[in-house]
Image: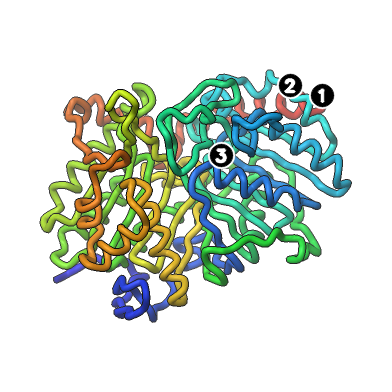
Amino acid sequence: MARHVSHHAVAPVESTGASGEGGRTSFPSILEQGENVWRRSRAATVRFLIDGDTYFRELRADLDFARKSVWIVGWDFDSDITLQRPDLHPQERLSAYLRSLVEQHEELVVRILVWAEGPFYSHGLTPYLSKSSWSDHPRVHMRYDTEHPVRASHHQKIVCIDDAVGFVGGIDLTSGRWDTRKHRFDDSARRDSKGESYSPVHDIQARVTGAAARVLADVARRRWLFGIGEEVPPEAGTSPEGIRPAEPDISDCPVGVALAEPGINGHERRTEPLRLICDIVDAGKRTIYIETQYLASSTVVERLCSRLREKDGPDVAIITTKHMRGIFEQWTMGFGRNRAIQRLEKSDRYNRLRIGYPVISDSAGGDCEILVHSKLVIIDDWFIRLGSSNLNRRSQGFDTECDLGMEAETEAHRVAIARLRNDLLAEHLGASLGEVEGLLARTGSLCAVIDGLNGRERRLKPFRVNLRYGTSSFWRYGSGIFDPHRPYWPLQRLLVPFRAMRTKLAALKRFLM
């Protein structure tokens, strides 16, 4: 049967290895520098950190080894969070911990770059009017990024230590991100920096070492240069002996870093995350597993629809969020998601599509939704893409994004990739890894696994599209306005003088403080 395949995809070769996925074993790399990735390199080790509790603990352990540089680049940053369990006493705030690091190590410099509007959206703070005594140290540089198109954001979530260890994924160092893999509906430790409780949240981050970590540090330096105007040279003489030893999930694998950038102020527009997702979706053979907060990219949805219309195409499992936060998010992402699900369901000719949102039973016998904040795509047992970009329009080249693509070269790599996908599915279904692997081995179908193991205290609820939104042109036009794929160029030109003035005022404030 005819199939739409990108120029990267090749005919798959059957695998007879332990993963048993029928994945690709001999193929040219799908990671193409200058096309679907900004830079291609290798990771000495990769470790997958599922949910905020795991990530924060691993990050804290690695920060203890920092001697030269710490980069923190994010959509938001809250210095009042702790990297330990929020209910531990005494608590050490992130601000106090970072301050102690630079005071202990005389060469260490900490640079923090945050989207200027992130703190306002996240916890109601106005950055330029807020004073932070902890960051007045000469080797702690806290900066707010204003160099973006109108209504665009800086959305990357990166931490780099000594150019030797890098973290990338969907988790910012801010309130509302911490949770354990149990996602208990009544977890008393799940409170923000103000002590207020919040709903369960699921996410994922990756820890990489080797050349890949250096590339992530280059991304941080690039964003610092574009946002602040200061060029920071790479670290020299970083020794691998200074890296904290940690058991890897994958060792020595090819990786690619994909960037989305709006292309303003003379810089080239980059849309590599979209290209990468389209290429790997086109090349999938047996399974496409997706975790996404939003599902509103018509380009990606059309690629998935094409695969679903194939008689022998892959199973497609999509784990997403049901409830949007506020009317504008419903207006943009909710409308796009509803249309996307309608299109996918119409294309599902062979019953190979499952779309659901994770819930856990609460004390009253109802359902407590688990917010899916992760941005993850796993193709068969040979490719993982995770990072900051959502499956929406604005992540395609309006906001700044950073994704990491990891490609299997060995049977051990394929086993690790399949295990991650199966482990995540087991978490959402309230099942054991063994149950998922056993049923998958017998049926060869992700859909069969979801159908066979669903319905427990932890489960995936099938998505029922709310047709209240999406039936009028009003909602359709609103989605196009608030979820654009590129800058509003006329408005952007009009506001250039005002943005320049804002940058100068920020520089004056730093000088006076």
Task: Name the colour scheme.
Answer: rainbow
Amino acid at the residue labelled 2: Lys
Amino acid at the residue labelled 3: Asp
Q: Residue at x 43, y 60 (%)?
A: 384
Q: Which mark is residue 131?
A: 2
Secondary-structure class at tag 2: loop
Q: Nearer the viewer, residue 219 or 265?
A: 219
User: Please, is residue 34 above or below residue 354 in the view?
Assistant: below
Please say whether residue 378 is visible from this viewpoint.
yes
Q: Would you identify the image quadrant in which residue 209 lies?
A: bottom right
Q: Which mark is residue 172?
A: 3
Viewport quadrant of the C terminus: top right
Q: Which mark is residue 280?
A: none
Q: Residue at x 38, y 26 (%)?
A: 325
Position of residue 202 in the picture relative to residue 107 (left or right): left
Say whether disc 3 or disc 2 marks the residue closer to the N-terminus: 2
**How far across and down, in percent of the image, does residue 14 sit?**
29, 79
Amino acid at the residue labelled 1: Met
What residue is pinned by disc 1? 513
Circle 2 residues within 10 Å: few <14, some 14–19, many ≥20: few
Camera-side mark, 1 or 3: 3
Circle 3 residues within 10 Å: few <14, some 14–19, many ≥20: many
Q: Are marks 1 and 2 in contact (CB under 8 Å)?
A: yes
**How far across and down, in percent of the image, does residue 508 sit?**
77, 25
Say whether disc 1 or disc 3 marks the residue closer to the N-terminus: 3
Q: Would you identify the image quadrant in which residue 148 lies?
A: top right
**How far across and down, in percent of the image, does residue 62 sit?**
69, 51
Gap between marks 1 and 3 measured at Cα: 27 Å
Q: Nearer the viewer, residue 480 or 459?
A: 459
Secondary-structure class at tag 1: loop
**How far across and down, in percent of the image, does residue 228 sit?**
69, 39
